[in-house]
Image (cartoon, rainbow, N blue to C red):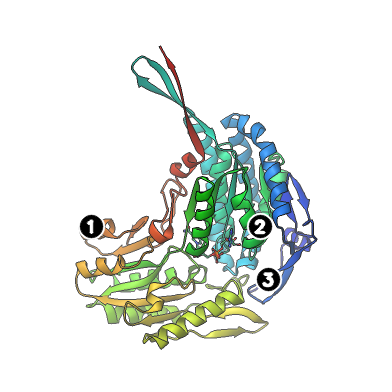
Amino acid sequence: MAETLRPNVAQFIKGPLQHYINGQWRPSKDGAVDDVIDPSTGKPICKVAMGGADEIDAAVAAAHGAFHSWASKTPNERSVMLHRLADSLEKHAADLAQLESMDVGKAIVNSEGFDIPFGVEGTRYFADLAVRALYDIPLGIKNIEARVHRVPYGVCGFVFPWNFPYDLLIWGVMPALAAGNTVVVKPSEVTPLTTLYVCKLASEVGIPPGVINVVVGTGAKAGSPLTAHPLVKRMSFTGSPGVGRIIGEVCGKNLKPCKLELGGKGAAVIFDDVDVNATAEKLAAAITLNTGQVCCTATRWIIHEKIYDDLVSKTREKLKAIRVGPALDRNTQMGPLVSRVQLERVTHYIENGTKQGATLLLEPQTLKVTGHEGGFYVTPSLLAGQSDNICCREEIFGPTAYVLKFKDEESAVKEVNSLSYGLANSVWSSDLKRAHRVAERMVAGNSWINANNVFAYGLPYGGVNLSGMGGGVNSPETFNDYLRSQTIARPL
Ligand code: NAD
């Protein structure tokens, strides 16, 4: 059953949706707006202002102006304010879930069951870290009275992608705010809704003007001037390796610290001692979660030859049974892809992969859903073939996996490490000694055992090589990233 829009959501999308700068809603100076498209229908949800350098300048000036006062609050005062925001996020969870699902095409059961509550928990986690952190660390140095004094950087810039707009916002900005920085956020132009809704709630609970600022716009017009702005003291980017490289270059040129959370092509190595049916269930869930648009999920399945046929056949059946439909329909297990561009990207990859010799073990179908004919629906698919195939080597970002066979542990590990990505891999075996050994040998920021997508506060997460640098997301590491150290010393 499709849901009707909640009153707060219906009111919010009436708009006009504008930038949030210095605690106020502002249009773009040049009046530019664009449609926000609903992936379930292909039709506009509403219009949103599209900003550029003028709006970025205003947002950075506001964040700069608010910094001293925010940084001077006690950690406890900041923590209390962020806890109030968390309470408000929780109170408006149903509104946020509906907005996130409409905007991204994410099944409503997932937004409600995971994305929104996990962001509430994250806000509380970082609010608590603010009061637990050490801001002065005494040093035992002979003949010198010395300490490391830890202070926030100032204005921090954030550029986010479209696949988990709300959670990535929380994971990104909450540690920065808790540590006493002020922020300017450029969400993806494709999915700005929950980011703007969080600003509305932040304003209602009394987060002071200028502490959080959001400018919606394209990467070229808004992301670029934000990255290069001299008053932005630290940058954080989540998105594709291509854009990550550009942002890293600009930050490098300006000697600005920069965290990059980039794409992945996660492998799952499955040994012959697993429960085949249970593993098939988890693999099917991995590539259909968020319609496969998950940077860290398992999209290369490296399966022991003894169970290959059985596991592939069971997974195929489970994928065929996945209910694809509109994001707000409560029966939907997998919604549409986020955009027409993404639908074309997935389709082209699969066409190219088959041209290069891959076999389709499960063919993707582009669907016309009654009443939602313009939506960007595609069913899950499975490919098999050589490991040099484009679909095995590049991030597709859709509900599709590439399967390979292996004989021995050594060749499986070699296969995993043959790509430059290094975000997350998993190993599946009931022999835990072997599982730990393989987990250690797979080169990436994260190795998961008998599971996919293991996220919990306190568990660091990040990528290496083509998947990024400076991880630690969701852990004290990322909170500490937003404090710079200053040594204070007095010879005795
Ligand atoms: P993208 O790189 O195309 O865009 C990401 C953001 O960068 C958008 O807001 C975009 O407007 C902006 N941007 C584009 N060009 C820019 C420029 N020159 N300067 C500044 N900003 C610019 O990525 P996408 O298509 O939105 O998202 C998908 C990608 O994100 C995938 O590669 C996925 O793996 C990755 N991702 C990684 C993680 C992680 O934690 N490692 C999490 C989610 C998504």
SS for callout 1: helix
Question: Is the CB of mark 1 within 8 Å of ligand 1?
Answer: no
Q: Looking at the image, which is closer to me, 226 or 342?
A: 226
Query: Residue beneath label 3, please?
Result: 37
Above or below — where is 333 with respect to 79?
A: below
Query: Residue beneath label 1, please?
Result: 437
The quadrant of the image that shows the C terminus is top left
Task: Look at the numbered discs 2 and 3 and tell me whether their residues touch, using CB distance below 8 Å.
Answer: no
Residue 176 left/right relative to 67: left
Three-letter code for the amino acid on which mark 1 is drawn: Arg
Q: Residue furthest front?
A: 253
On the image, the x and y values in percent for residue 284 come to: 41, 73
SS for callout 2: helix
Three-letter code for the amino acid on which mark 2 is drawn: Ala
Q: Which mark is residue 222?
A: 2
Question: Is the CB of mark 3 within 8 Å of ligand 1?
Answer: no
Local crowd at mark 1 within 10 Å, few (<14), some, or many (≥20)? few
On the image, the x and y values in percent for residue 235 come to: 55, 48
On the image, the x and y values in percent for residue 10 come to: 75, 63
Q: Looking at the image, which is closer to me, 176 or 376?
A: 176
Residue 240 left/right relative to 9: left
Q: Which mark is residue 230?
A: none
- Observer able to see residue 336: no
Residue 40 left/right relative to 128: right
> Which of pointers 1 and 3 lies earlier in the amino acid sequence?
3
Local crowd at mark 2 within 10 Å, few (<14), some, or many (≥20)? many
Q: Residue at x 65, y 50 (%)?
A: 91
Question: Is the CB of mark 2 within 8 Å of ligand 1?
Answer: yes
The quarter of the image that holds ligand 1 is: bottom right
Picture quadrant where residue 428 is located: bottom left
